[in-house]
Amino acid sequence: MSSILALPAGARRDRRHRWKVLGIGVAANASFSAAFSGIPTTAVFMRSDYHLDNASLGLAMGLLGLGIAVSELPWGLLTDRWGDRRVLLLGLGATAAALALMALFAAPTSDRVPGLGLLATGMLLVGLLGGSVNGSSGRAVMAWFREGERGLAMSIRQTAVPAGGGLGALILPSLAATHGFVAVYGVLAILCAVTTLFAARWLHEPAELDAAPASPASRLAAARGPLRNLDVWRVATAIGLLCVPQLSVLTFGTIFLHDFGHASVAVTSAALVTVQVGAGVMRVWSGRWTDRNRNRRAYMRGCCLLSAGIFLALAPVVSMVGSAVAPSVLALAAIVGLLVVGGITASAWHGVAFTELATLAGASRAGTALALGNSFAFMTLFLTPLAIPLLLNWSAWPVVWLGAGGCALLALPVFPRGAAVSSDPAASRSATRP
């Protein structure tokens, strides 16, 4: 505390202002997460209100992820060129407008059911515009926080994803059931618009971010760029693989519990809310713990193993229960318990992984690196809802969960046993920042 008081008044204000920047990053991610994680929790109502089958439902939800995936990298490059403020204001404001247009023109009413084409176009547009949020807010956090603080700060920011998804899981299914998708899209548009106003008021960049690198190694890393760094690509690929079990739960968890477990809307909503809240708590804890122990890669290895183990255990449990009749209360409790614990484990690592990714690139190029990681993550969001109906048509739910666990195992070689935490190529500069 005394060292902070010894700083000039302007530096102390900057130290306090970083928490406002983090708050804006949390709000931006939460408002967009309520859309891309919350809308899938309305899957049962979307399927009936839009008159869709499982394959069409998977396509509509998958296009939301595809839009984010293909736009992440261009938005990230623009963020490193234009700055986080301009990109976040443009992208989040446009996302709010796109959701408002969906409420007006792409929501089923008593006398009109929009076709799959209109719904899919709207989902794709929301994804394309919302892809701006992740890289820009992450770069802002990396700019304002120093090495040794970034794991916690980035994990808090990433906590906004399950927090927003949990908010969506809590309110959107009931809104869809009682007021329809006009209310669903309208509420999401309001959330994004309010966050845009907060960003316009408080988000700006510290002047130190554009300073020249302090060492030849830093200059070399900055000149090479994250897209030419093999380690950045390896971690980004692992992020995509680890998202498969997470997104299997988030996109088709409600369908699984409804169709296979014959669970009520209350049970399915409670399960998904628990997943999101639990993931948020774990993200904050893991960020702080890995900051203290400098063991981000070892932690990621543990998440790979634990996620794989839980989903590989869920598959035989589901197989033994069978789907001919509603499972007993005990069997349903076991299925819901494994699904919730697996969903939390498969979502707990995000802040740590994205901190590692941004650290490999350096704070000044974090926008591009974070966008690359998010491109892999949201390409998974596109592919997973498409793959699950195909697996169900070919086999049954146990194969879905076996595939989810297998993808977690495929990410394991990226984080070998005994791997050390990466050092920031711009760490010397960050250490002098107030």
Image: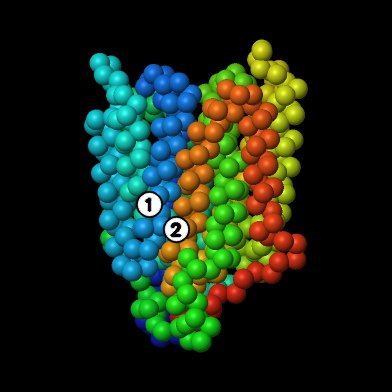
Q: Quadrant of the C terminus?
A: bottom left
- Residue positioned 35% across, 33% down in the render: 120
Q: Nearer the viewer, residue 74 or 112?
A: 74
Please tell me whether residue 138 is drawn above or below residue 2 in the rendered image.
above
Q: Amino acid at mark 2?
A: Ala
Q: Residue at x 48, y 24 (%)?
A: 54
Q: Is residue 295 left or right of residue 145?
A: right
Q: Is residue 325 left or right of residue 99?
A: right
Query: Does residue 257 show up?
Result: no
**Is any part of residue 212 visible from this angle?**
yes
* Picture layout, residue 146 above or below residue 319: below
Where 64 sits versus 281, above or below? above
> Residue, x 71% and y 40% (percent of image)?
310
Q: Position of residue 272 (x, y in %)?
A: 55, 35
Task: Give the residue at mark 2.
Answer: 371
Determine the CA span between mark 2 and mark 1: 9 Å
Mark number, residue 359: none
